[in-house]
Amino acid sequence: MKSEPISKPLKVKTHTTSAPAAVHLQTIGPEEAGQRLDNYLLRWAKGVPKSHVYRIIRSGEVRVNKKRAEPTTRLIEGDVVRLPPVRIAEPAQMAAVNSAQTKSRAHGYSDKMPILFEDEALLIVDKPPGLAVHGGSGIALGVIETLRITRPELKFLELVHRLDRDTSGVLLLAKKRSALVELHRQIREGQTDKRYYLLAHGEIQQGAQVMQLKYPLHKYLLANGERRVRVDPEGLPSHTALRVSKTMKRADAAITLAEAQLKTGRTHQIRVHLQKLGHAILGDDKYGFEDQDKVIKSKRLYLHAHLAGFTHPRTGEKMRIESPLPAEFAAMMKNFEPIEAS
């Protein structure tokens, strides 16, 4: 299969032919329509600092239909965008895609990523743990780069949502911008259903009622720049519905199999909510219990996106895409005996 770079070169009209760096005029097509101007430029100017992109918008060097525009301006099919001369530095992860070794790795990743559903608008995969959804911060290949390499026939492909690198399961991608915009609307308006299986430390006492976890969450950065989230009264509202499926124990530990349903979609929401509850998820290297993970020999983050429910953006059909409980979950639970309900 023939491969292409992650980001295809733009087909542009130039005003000059003598200068190596020239002004370009780009006409917005149906797949670019609906984007904010800043997001369009950030995709076009791969490797250019965000601050520079916003500067050329503010200065008027970027124009839409010969007029100044704001970063938040929504582009419409047929708009003509003036793109000033910009030296586009190719990021390391993009350069790496051109190597045969990287292409080989991409095909290897793709082989471990089953397709759960595909049609002309959507591509839904079962993401393995350990694979980031996109490259960056020293990661050359994520899900999106992998699929752009292995599926070069797709002219448009974007992530609908994200999963943490160590979380496995159902991941939605859009093959049409119209599908992406519609699914984002459904997510924004709470019209989707996202559920996760998890294994947590300890015995979670719940009974027949669904547990409603409503801890507000605040994002912050560590000294090394790494992102973290904590429960904070001044944080954003967040809501997880938790259903206990089974509790298990052995001489030195107890664990709980549960299903978490997202009512909001904050960063690391389920992981931080379980930590706050006092029952961190097994194998969580950011919010977990390191000593207990060593005792039970956790091999991964035991969090799996097993169900995505939404309305198909083109047909209007109610969709329910599921991924089975991973083998690692079953293998871990075999080390424990069920706790009988009293």
Image: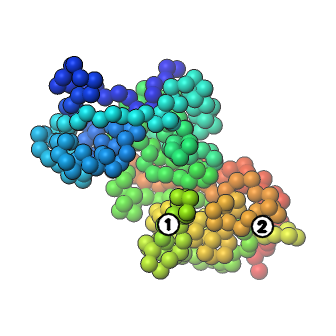
Q: Position of residue 118 (x, y in %)?
A: 47, 37
Query: In the image, is 262 to the left or to the right of 20?
Result: right
Image quadrant in which the C terminus is located: bottom right
Query: In the image, is 246 to the left or to the right of 136?
Result: right
- Residue 227 seen anywhere in this rendered image of the structure: yes
Image quadrant of residue 230?
bottom right
Mark 1 vs mark 2: which is more N-terminal? 1
Residue type marked 2: Gln
Considering the numbered disc 2 on the image, is that residue within a helix, a strand or a loop?
helix
Name the residue that disc number 2 marks.
Answer: 292
What's the mark number on residue 80?
none
> At 80% across and 61% down in the image, what residue appears?
294
Residue type marked 1: Tyr
User: Relative to 234, is 166 above or below?
Assistant: above
> At 53% across and 58% down in the image, what residue appears?
225
Considering the numbered disc 1 on the image, is that residue within a helix, a strand or a loop?
strand
User: Relative to 2, is 279 above or below?
Assistant: below
- Spatial CA distance of label 1 from label 2 is 26 Å
Query: Which label lies toward us, 1 or 2?
Result: 1
Instruction: Give the camera-side residue of 211 and 71.
Output: 71
Q: Position of residue 293 (x, y in %)?
A: 76, 62
Q: Position of residue 46 (x, y in %)?
A: 38, 38
Crowding at dot 1, Cα within 10 Å, few <14 / some 14-19 / many 20+, comes out as few
Query: In the image, is 289 to the left or to the right of 72?
Result: right
Outermost residue to the front = 19
> At 47% across and 33% down in the image, what residue appears?
94
User: Relative to 224, is 1 above or below?
Assistant: above
Marks 1 and 2 close (CB-CB < 8 Å) = no
> At 28% across and 23% down in the image, what residue appears?
20
Name the residue that disc number 1 marks.
Answer: 220
